[in-house]
Image (cartoon, rainbow, N blue to C red):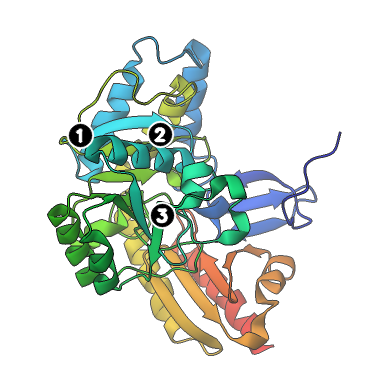
Amino acid sequence: MNLFDVYTLWDIEPVKAKGCKVWDRNGTEYLDLYGGHAVISIGHSHPHYIDKITQQLRSIGFYSNSVVNSLQTELAEKLGEQSGYPDYSLFLCNSGAEANENALKLASFHTGKDKVLAFGSSFHGRTSGAVAVTDNPAIRSPFNSHHNISFVPLNDIEAVENELKSGEYAAVIIEGIQGVAGIFEPETEFLKQLEALCKKHHAALILDEIQSGYGRTGHFFAHQNAGIQADLITMAKGMGNGFPIGGVLISPSFEAKKGMLGTTFGGNHLACAAAIAVLDVMKNETLTDHAAAVGKYLIDELSKTDGIAEIRGRGLMIGVQLKPEQTDLRNRLLFEDHVFTGGAKNNIMRLLPPLSISKTEATLFLQSLKKQLSL
Protein backbone atom coordinates (compact mmCIF):
# COMPACT_ATOMS: atom_id res chain seq x y z
CA MET A 1 0.00 0.00 0.00
CA ASN A 2 1.19 3.52 -0.85
CA LEU A 3 0.51 6.77 0.96
CA PHE A 4 -2.07 9.04 -0.66
CA ASP A 5 0.21 11.53 -2.41
CA VAL A 6 -1.12 14.94 -1.31
CA TYR A 7 2.00 16.55 0.21
CA THR A 8 5.00 18.16 -1.45
CA LEU A 9 7.86 16.89 0.69
CA TRP A 10 11.37 18.11 1.34
CA ASP A 11 13.79 15.17 1.10
CA ILE A 12 14.68 15.45 4.79
CA GLU A 13 13.59 13.18 7.64
CA PRO A 14 14.05 14.68 11.12
CA VAL A 15 14.73 11.94 13.68
CA LYS A 16 15.72 13.99 16.74
CA ALA A 17 14.86 17.42 18.09
CA LYS A 18 15.65 19.59 21.09
CA GLY A 19 14.79 23.21 21.79
CA CYS A 20 14.90 25.04 18.46
CA LYS A 21 16.99 22.45 16.62
CA VAL A 22 16.28 19.23 14.74
CA TRP A 23 18.60 16.56 13.33
CA ASP A 24 18.09 14.36 10.28
CA ARG A 25 19.08 10.72 9.70
CA ASN A 26 22.55 11.81 8.60
CA GLY A 27 23.15 13.77 11.80
CA THR A 28 22.81 17.15 10.08
CA GLU A 29 21.64 19.86 12.49
CA TYR A 30 18.92 22.32 11.44
CA LEU A 31 17.75 25.54 13.07
CA ASP A 32 13.96 25.50 13.31
CA LEU A 33 12.30 28.80 12.40
CA TYR A 34 9.15 26.95 11.34
CA GLY A 35 8.15 25.11 14.53
CA GLY A 36 6.42 22.38 12.56
CA HIS A 37 3.96 25.01 11.30
CA ALA A 38 3.62 27.00 14.56
CA VAL A 39 2.94 23.83 16.55
CA ILE A 40 6.10 23.70 18.67
CA SER A 41 5.47 26.36 21.28
CA ILE A 42 7.75 25.54 24.23
CA GLY A 43 10.52 23.94 22.19
CA HIS A 44 11.20 20.38 21.06
CA SER A 45 11.64 17.71 23.74
CA HIS A 46 11.26 20.00 26.73
CA PRO A 47 12.09 17.91 29.84
CA HIS A 48 8.98 18.97 31.80
CA TYR A 49 6.81 18.11 28.80
CA ILE A 50 8.43 14.69 28.43
CA ASP A 51 8.11 13.96 32.15
CA LYS A 52 4.46 15.00 32.28
CA ILE A 53 3.43 12.80 29.35
CA THR A 54 5.58 9.86 30.49
CA GLN A 55 4.16 9.95 34.01
CA GLN A 56 0.63 10.15 32.66
CA LEU A 57 1.15 7.20 30.32
CA ARG A 58 2.35 5.11 33.25
CA SER A 59 -0.97 5.66 35.03
CA ILE A 60 -3.69 5.98 32.34
CA GLY A 61 -3.36 7.20 28.78
CA PHE A 62 -6.96 7.25 27.65
CA TYR A 63 -10.54 6.83 28.66
CA SER A 64 -13.64 8.29 27.07
CA ASN A 65 -15.58 11.40 28.05
CA SER A 66 -18.17 9.24 29.77
CA VAL A 67 -16.19 9.47 33.03
CA VAL A 68 -14.68 12.22 35.17
CA ASN A 69 -11.23 13.39 34.07
CA SER A 70 -9.77 15.83 36.58
CA LEU A 71 -6.97 16.72 34.15
CA GLN A 72 -9.57 18.49 32.00
CA THR A 73 -10.57 20.64 34.98
CA GLU A 74 -6.93 21.42 35.79
CA LEU A 75 -6.30 22.40 32.18
CA ALA A 76 -9.39 24.63 32.07
CA GLU A 77 -8.42 26.43 35.27
CA LYS A 78 -4.83 27.06 34.16
CA LEU A 79 -5.89 28.11 30.68
CA GLY A 80 -8.51 30.51 32.04
CA GLU A 81 -5.95 32.12 34.35
CA GLN A 82 -3.19 32.50 31.77
CA SER A 83 -5.37 33.49 28.82
CA GLY A 84 -7.31 36.22 30.65
CA TYR A 85 -10.63 34.44 30.13
CA PRO A 86 -11.23 32.86 33.56
CA ASP A 87 -15.04 33.03 33.36
CA TYR A 88 -15.26 31.24 30.00
CA SER A 89 -15.92 27.52 29.54
CA LEU A 90 -13.66 25.11 27.65
CA PHE A 91 -14.65 22.48 25.12
CA LEU A 92 -11.78 20.15 24.22
CA CYS A 93 -11.30 18.47 20.85
CA ASN A 94 -8.42 17.26 18.67
CA SER A 95 -7.50 19.90 16.09
CA GLY A 96 -7.97 23.44 14.87
CA ALA A 97 -10.44 22.50 12.16
CA GLU A 98 -12.52 20.59 14.71
CA ALA A 99 -12.40 23.58 17.06
CA ASN A 100 -13.73 25.84 14.31
CA GLU A 101 -16.45 23.34 13.39
CA ASN A 102 -17.69 23.33 16.98
CA ALA A 103 -17.45 27.12 17.32
CA LEU A 104 -19.56 27.59 14.19
CA LYS A 105 -22.09 25.08 15.49
CA LEU A 106 -22.24 26.79 18.89
CA ALA A 107 -22.82 30.16 17.26
CA SER A 108 -25.69 28.74 15.23
CA PHE A 109 -27.21 27.03 18.28
CA HIS A 110 -26.89 30.24 20.30
CA THR A 111 -28.36 32.64 17.73
CA GLY A 112 -30.76 30.32 15.92
CA LYS A 113 -29.33 31.61 12.62
CA ASP A 114 -27.28 29.88 9.91
CA LYS A 115 -25.31 32.50 7.95
CA VAL A 116 -21.61 33.13 8.58
CA LEU A 117 -19.41 36.02 7.50
CA ALA A 118 -15.72 35.33 6.82
CA PHE A 119 -12.84 37.25 5.23
CA GLY A 120 -10.90 37.23 2.01
CA SER A 121 -7.74 35.07 2.06
CA SER A 122 -8.89 33.40 5.29
CA PHE A 123 -7.93 29.87 6.30
CA HIS A 124 -9.87 28.00 8.99
CA GLY A 125 -9.26 24.32 8.24
CA ARG A 126 -10.06 21.47 5.87
CA THR A 127 -13.15 19.84 7.37
CA SER A 128 -16.58 20.60 5.94
CA GLY A 129 -17.66 23.73 7.84
CA ALA A 130 -14.11 25.00 8.33
CA VAL A 131 -13.26 24.77 4.64
CA ALA A 132 -16.55 26.46 3.76
CA VAL A 133 -15.41 29.59 5.62
CA THR A 134 -11.92 29.34 4.09
CA ASP A 135 -11.35 31.59 1.09
CA ASN A 136 -9.65 29.02 -1.11
CA PRO A 137 -11.77 27.35 -3.82
CA ALA A 138 -8.93 24.91 -4.56
CA ILE A 139 -9.58 22.97 -1.33
CA ARG A 140 -13.39 23.26 -1.37
CA SER A 141 -15.12 20.28 -2.97
CA PRO A 142 -18.72 20.45 -4.25
CA PHE A 143 -19.76 18.79 -0.99
CA ASN A 144 -18.21 21.70 0.95
CA SER A 145 -20.09 24.41 -0.94
CA HIS A 146 -22.27 26.24 1.56
CA HIS A 147 -24.53 28.95 0.20
CA ASN A 148 -24.91 30.62 3.60
CA ILE A 149 -21.27 31.83 3.73
CA SER A 150 -20.23 35.32 2.62
CA PHE A 151 -16.73 36.78 2.31
CA VAL A 152 -15.66 40.42 2.63
CA PRO A 153 -12.20 42.02 2.46
CA LEU A 154 -10.15 42.13 5.66
CA ASN A 155 -10.23 45.54 7.39
CA ASP A 156 -13.23 46.75 5.36
CA ILE A 157 -15.68 47.68 8.12
CA GLU A 158 -18.24 49.12 5.69
CA ALA A 159 -18.45 45.79 3.88
CA VAL A 160 -18.96 44.05 7.23
CA GLU A 161 -21.73 46.43 8.24
CA ASN A 162 -23.49 46.05 4.90
CA GLU A 163 -23.67 42.30 5.50
CA LEU A 164 -24.50 42.25 9.21
CA LYS A 165 -27.29 44.83 9.06
CA SER A 166 -29.59 42.17 7.59
CA GLY A 167 -29.61 40.52 11.03
CA GLU A 168 -29.31 37.09 9.38
CA TYR A 169 -25.79 36.20 10.52
CA ALA A 170 -25.07 33.69 13.28
CA ALA A 171 -21.37 34.54 13.39
CA VAL A 172 -18.37 36.37 12.06
CA ILE A 173 -15.18 34.29 12.02
CA ILE A 174 -11.78 35.97 11.77
CA GLU A 175 -8.17 34.97 12.38
CA GLY A 176 -6.23 36.83 15.07
CA ILE A 177 -3.63 37.26 12.32
CA GLN A 178 -4.10 35.65 8.91
CA GLY A 179 -1.40 33.00 8.74
CA VAL A 180 -1.75 30.94 5.57
CA ALA A 181 -2.43 34.15 3.62
CA GLY A 182 1.05 35.39 4.54
CA ILE A 183 0.75 37.18 7.92
CA PHE A 184 -1.85 39.90 7.48
CA GLU A 185 -3.25 41.62 10.58
CA PRO A 186 -6.72 42.93 11.28
CA GLU A 187 -6.29 46.60 12.19
CA THR A 188 -6.92 47.53 15.82
CA GLU A 189 -9.73 49.97 15.05
CA PHE A 190 -11.28 47.48 12.65
CA LEU A 191 -11.41 44.81 15.38
CA LYS A 192 -13.00 47.23 17.83
CA GLN A 193 -15.67 48.22 15.33
CA LEU A 194 -16.19 44.57 14.39
CA GLU A 195 -16.80 43.66 18.03
CA ALA A 196 -19.36 46.47 18.31
CA LEU A 197 -21.16 45.47 15.10
CA CYS A 198 -21.40 41.83 16.19
CA LYS A 199 -23.04 42.91 19.45
CA LYS A 200 -25.38 45.31 17.66
CA HIS A 201 -26.58 42.70 15.17
CA HIS A 202 -26.51 39.72 17.57
CA ALA A 203 -23.84 37.77 15.69
CA ALA A 204 -21.27 35.75 17.61
CA LEU A 205 -17.68 36.91 17.15
CA ILE A 206 -15.39 33.89 16.62
CA LEU A 207 -11.65 34.52 16.91
CA ASP A 208 -9.61 31.81 15.23
CA GLU A 209 -6.39 31.87 17.27
CA ILE A 210 -5.20 28.46 16.09
CA GLN A 211 -1.95 29.79 14.64
CA SER A 212 -1.78 33.24 16.26
CA GLY A 213 -2.63 32.21 19.83
CA TYR A 214 -0.78 30.68 22.76
CA GLY A 215 1.68 33.50 23.33
CA ARG A 216 3.00 33.67 19.77
CA THR A 217 2.38 37.40 19.24
CA GLY A 218 3.34 38.67 22.69
CA HIS A 219 -0.21 38.38 24.02
CA PHE A 220 -1.81 35.07 24.92
CA PHE A 221 -4.20 35.67 22.00
CA ALA A 222 -3.43 38.06 19.15
CA HIS A 223 -6.81 39.83 19.38
CA GLN A 224 -6.01 40.96 22.94
CA ASN A 225 -3.63 43.52 21.44
CA ALA A 226 -6.78 45.40 20.32
CA GLY A 227 -8.41 45.17 23.75
CA ILE A 228 -11.46 43.31 22.46
CA GLN A 229 -13.23 40.22 23.78
CA ALA A 230 -14.53 37.43 21.57
CA ASP A 231 -17.58 35.24 22.14
CA LEU A 232 -15.78 32.10 20.98
CA ILE A 233 -12.03 31.52 20.68
CA THR A 234 -10.57 28.54 18.86
CA MET A 235 -7.15 27.06 19.65
CA ALA A 236 -4.89 24.16 18.62
CA LYS A 237 -1.31 24.09 17.23
CA GLY A 238 0.84 25.43 20.12
CA MET A 239 -1.64 24.14 22.69
CA GLY A 240 -0.07 20.66 22.79
CA ASN A 241 3.48 21.30 21.51
CA GLY A 242 3.01 18.49 19.00
CA PHE A 243 0.45 16.34 20.79
CA PRO A 244 -2.90 16.69 18.95
CA ILE A 245 -5.32 18.82 20.96
CA GLY A 246 -7.69 21.67 20.19
CA GLY A 247 -10.22 23.67 22.12
CA VAL A 248 -12.93 26.31 22.10
CA LEU A 249 -13.23 28.97 24.80
CA ILE A 250 -16.92 29.77 25.19
CA SER A 251 -18.54 32.92 26.59
CA PRO A 252 -20.61 32.44 29.76
CA SER A 253 -23.60 33.79 27.81
CA PHE A 254 -23.72 30.53 25.83
CA GLU A 255 -25.97 27.81 27.24
CA ALA A 256 -24.65 24.24 27.38
CA LYS A 257 -27.00 21.34 26.69
CA LYS A 258 -26.15 17.68 27.12
CA GLY A 259 -25.26 16.09 23.81
CA MET A 260 -24.99 19.28 21.73
CA LEU A 261 -21.23 18.71 21.28
CA GLY A 262 -19.12 15.60 21.59
CA THR A 263 -15.80 13.95 20.78
CA THR A 264 -14.21 10.53 21.24
CA PHE A 265 -10.56 11.48 21.65
CA GLY A 266 -10.84 15.16 22.64
CA GLY A 267 -9.54 16.00 26.10
CA ASN A 268 -8.05 12.57 26.69
CA HIS A 269 -5.60 12.05 29.53
CA LEU A 270 -2.43 12.23 27.46
CA ALA A 271 -3.60 15.29 25.52
CA CYS A 272 -4.47 17.11 28.73
CA ALA A 273 -1.13 16.20 30.31
CA ALA A 274 0.65 17.63 27.27
CA ALA A 275 -1.43 20.83 27.32
CA ILE A 276 -0.92 21.32 31.06
CA ALA A 277 2.84 20.91 30.60
CA VAL A 278 2.79 23.59 27.88
CA LEU A 279 1.02 26.07 30.16
CA ASP A 280 3.42 25.24 33.02
CA VAL A 281 6.45 25.99 30.86
CA MET A 282 4.90 29.09 29.31
CA LYS A 283 4.28 30.51 32.78
CA ASN A 284 7.53 29.44 34.44
CA GLU A 285 9.71 30.59 31.55
CA THR A 286 7.61 33.70 30.71
CA LEU A 287 7.52 32.63 27.07
CA THR A 288 4.85 35.12 26.00
CA ASP A 289 7.06 38.03 27.04
CA HIS A 290 10.07 36.27 25.55
CA ALA A 291 8.26 35.85 22.22
CA ALA A 292 7.48 39.58 22.20
CA ALA A 293 11.10 40.52 22.89
CA VAL A 294 12.80 38.16 20.43
CA GLY A 295 10.10 38.87 17.85
CA LYS A 296 10.74 42.60 18.12
CA TYR A 297 14.47 41.99 17.69
CA LEU A 298 13.86 39.89 14.57
CA ILE A 299 11.43 42.39 13.04
CA ASP A 300 13.74 45.33 13.77
CA GLU A 301 16.71 43.57 12.19
CA LEU A 302 14.71 42.29 9.21
CA SER A 303 13.44 45.82 8.59
CA LYS A 304 17.05 46.95 8.16
CA THR A 305 17.96 44.07 5.83
CA ASP A 306 18.46 44.76 2.12
CA GLY A 307 16.67 42.56 -0.38
CA ILE A 308 13.34 42.26 1.49
CA ALA A 309 10.21 43.90 0.15
CA GLU A 310 8.13 44.06 3.37
CA ILE A 311 7.96 42.76 6.95
CA ARG A 312 4.63 42.00 8.63
CA GLY A 313 3.49 40.52 11.92
CA ARG A 314 4.08 40.65 15.66
CA GLY A 315 6.05 38.60 18.13
CA LEU A 316 7.12 35.29 16.63
CA MET A 317 4.54 35.31 13.85
CA ILE A 318 6.41 37.11 11.09
CA GLY A 319 5.83 37.39 7.35
CA VAL A 320 8.79 38.27 5.15
CA GLN A 321 7.66 39.44 1.72
CA LEU A 322 10.48 38.45 -0.58
CA LYS A 323 11.31 40.14 -3.85
CA PRO A 324 10.36 38.34 -7.11
CA GLU A 325 13.94 37.27 -7.80
CA GLN A 326 14.16 35.41 -4.45
CA THR A 327 11.83 32.52 -5.29
CA ASP A 328 14.39 29.87 -4.26
CA LEU A 329 15.54 31.60 -1.06
CA ARG A 330 13.77 29.23 1.36
CA ASN A 331 15.26 26.18 -0.36
CA ARG A 332 18.74 27.68 -0.21
CA LEU A 333 18.30 28.43 3.49
CA LEU A 334 17.19 24.86 4.10
CA PHE A 335 19.65 22.88 2.01
CA GLU A 336 22.72 25.14 2.23
CA ASP A 337 22.40 26.77 5.66
CA HIS A 338 20.14 24.15 7.30
CA VAL A 339 17.39 26.52 8.44
CA PHE A 340 13.71 25.55 8.35
CA THR A 341 11.26 28.34 7.48
CA GLY A 342 7.60 28.36 6.46
CA GLY A 343 6.09 29.63 3.26
CA ALA A 344 2.93 31.22 1.87
CA LYS A 345 1.67 32.19 -1.55
CA ASN A 346 3.10 35.20 -3.42
CA ASN A 347 6.68 34.44 -2.34
CA ILE A 348 6.22 35.03 1.38
CA MET A 349 8.45 33.44 4.02
CA ARG A 350 6.74 32.76 7.34
CA LEU A 351 8.74 32.66 10.57
CA LEU A 352 6.96 30.61 13.26
CA PRO A 353 9.73 29.36 15.57
CA PRO A 354 9.31 27.87 19.03
CA LEU A 355 8.56 30.63 21.55
CA SER A 356 11.74 29.60 23.36
CA ILE A 357 14.06 30.62 20.52
CA SER A 358 17.04 32.53 21.91
CA LYS A 359 18.35 35.84 20.63
CA THR A 360 21.55 33.99 19.68
CA GLU A 361 19.58 31.54 17.54
CA ALA A 362 17.62 34.40 16.00
CA THR A 363 20.93 36.07 15.12
CA LEU A 364 22.20 32.89 13.47
CA PHE A 365 19.10 32.88 11.27
CA LEU A 366 19.61 36.56 10.37
CA GLN A 367 23.22 35.87 9.41
CA SER A 368 22.18 33.01 7.12
CA LEU A 369 19.40 35.09 5.58
CA LYS A 370 21.66 38.06 4.89
CA LYS A 371 24.26 35.77 3.34
CA GLN A 372 21.70 34.21 1.00
CA LEU A 373 20.19 37.57 0.09
CA SER A 374 23.63 38.88 -0.90
CA LEU A 375 24.26 36.05 -3.40
What amino acid type is highlighted by mark number 3?
A: Ile
For the residue pair 237 and 252, the one nearer the viewer reads as 252
Q: Identify the element where label 3 is drawn.
A: strand
Judge from the rendering whether residue 344 lies leftward or rightward of residue 24; answer left or right: left
Q: Which mark is residue 343?
A: none
The residue carrying mark 1 is: 254
Q: Is residue 165 left or right of residue 247?
A: left
- Determine if residue 367 is in view: yes
Q: Residue 125's x, y, as percent?
A: 50, 49
Rounded to the nearest whole Å, what is the CA distance between mark 3 and mark 1?
Answer: 22 Å
**Which amino acid is tagged 2?**
Ala
User: Which circle marks residue 275 in the picture?
Assistant: 2
Coordinates of residue 210 in the picture (x, y in percent): 42, 49
Secondary structure of the residue carrying tag 2 is helix
Q: Report, in whole angstroms, how far the alpha carbon at label 2 lies from the one at label 1.
A: 24 Å
* Residue 348, image x, y percentages: 56, 74
Q: Is residue 174 left or right of residue 230?
A: right
Q: Quadrant where the N terminus lies?
A: top right
| Vertical order, 271 against 175 (above or below) | above
Verify CB contact (< 8 Å) between mark 3 and mark 2: no
Where residue 103 sits, quadrant-wise, is: top left
Residue 32 position (above or below residue 347): above
Q: Nearer the viewer, residue 307 or 223?
A: 223
